Amino acid sequence: MSRAVSQTALVCIEGFWGDVFRHIANAQAMRTSGPPFAAALLIAAEHLGFLEETGIVFSVLAGLFLVATVFSSVHFAEVISVRIGQPFGSVLLAIAVTVIEASLIISMMLSPSEGDPTVARDTVFATVMLVLNGVVGLCLLAGGLRHREQSFQSHGAVAAFSVLGTLATLTLILPNFTLAVEGPYYSIVQLVFVTVVSLLLYGLFLFVQTVRHRGDFLDIAAADAAVHVKPGGGETAWSGLMLAVSLLMVIVLAEALAPAMEEGVSVLGLAESFVGLIIAAVVLLPEGMTALRAAASNRLQTSMNVATGSALASVGLSIPTIAIASLLLGEPITLGLDPEHIVLLVLSLFVGMLTLATGRTTIMQGAVHLVVFFCFLLLAAVP
């Protein structure tokens, strides 16, 4: 009996690894897996002294590999999403990108040359504005132009926006009006309370999205399930590994290119915070591409899941993670937004609720979100 079980397990293991090796040998897999490894070799060459980080050769190659690696990460994320289904695929991608975002913010806070207590606030705010207005606006516009009108389940979208509005207000607006500590800061007690509440509320939302009311977050079009063929276990495992490597390379390359971007922003006469906006845009590019492709394929529900999920994860996970790091390391963290940014955030939440309330969208809603996004870009460049 035990021998039969052992043989069965051995066959399963051989089948799994055989699937992995067959997938790696596939031409498509080699094309999508190449950029992350090429980026790793470039970073290694820079650390070993073969290339200078400030040199033009390194900057050009890093920029090219950055774009290629972003597209690779989009491919791996879509493979995993098809395998595990929605909304779990959207949740996985949002959490993965948020972990990297929080890591980047903490590293910048601790950097002797770039340490800035406002970097967490500025990066999270930029992420929220990019998602709610840039990504959502492009998705609605692209979907409306191709399909004229699109539908989705408003129950799930409105629930996500209610949580997002609460978390954004508690973390980015309320600190400006508290009295325990002067300035846009929370006291230690207040910061601990907001951190705990944010994590609990985000965890409850995940439970509702993936278990209790999962149907509210699934695509209305039932035919969508027949379009995709689920990948095998080996392909999924390889895609998961390469997604982690790709996202890591994206953030490493973006951080390596930061000095060149800072110099470019300075030459153009733009605000210093614009560099953070550029890095946030690069980090969000995989999710943005995934959401845009879903909207173009008439899977607007998936697109909304990715967009709102990434914004929720940025506020509900990044801020608490950074707050805990701030308490442990004794580094100050500025949370309250400037007045003009508060106006843009409130406007974005208001417009977003109106967009999602009816469960149907056209190019009109997309245009409105993009106008708000362009206003944000203007004030980010020229405050």
Image (cartoon, rainbow, N blue to C red):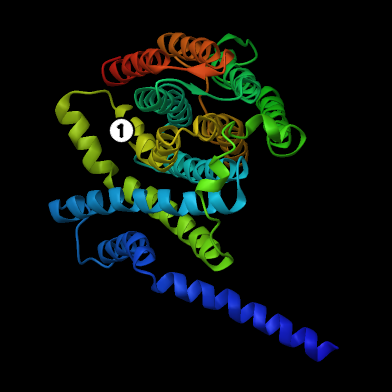
Which residue is pictured at 18% across the width and 23% down the height?
269
Left of 39 or right of it: where is 310? Answer: right
Q: Residue furthest right?
A: 1
With 333 as the anchor, is 251 left or right in this view? left
| Pointer 1 residue | 275
The three-letter code of the residue at mark 1 reads Val
- Is any atom of residue 199 visible in this view? no
**Front in this rendered view, residue 62 or 365:** 365
Query: Depth check: 135 or 322 in front?
Result: 135
Percent x, y of residue 203: 71, 35
Q: Residue, x 41% and y 43% (percent of image)?
A: 286
**Image vertical order of residue 14 relative to residue 62, above or below:** below
Q: For the C terminus, which image quadrant?
A: top left
Q: Residues within 10 Å of mark 1 (few under 14, many from 20)?
A: many
Residue sitting at x 60%, y 42%: 86
Q: Is residue 353 visible?
A: yes
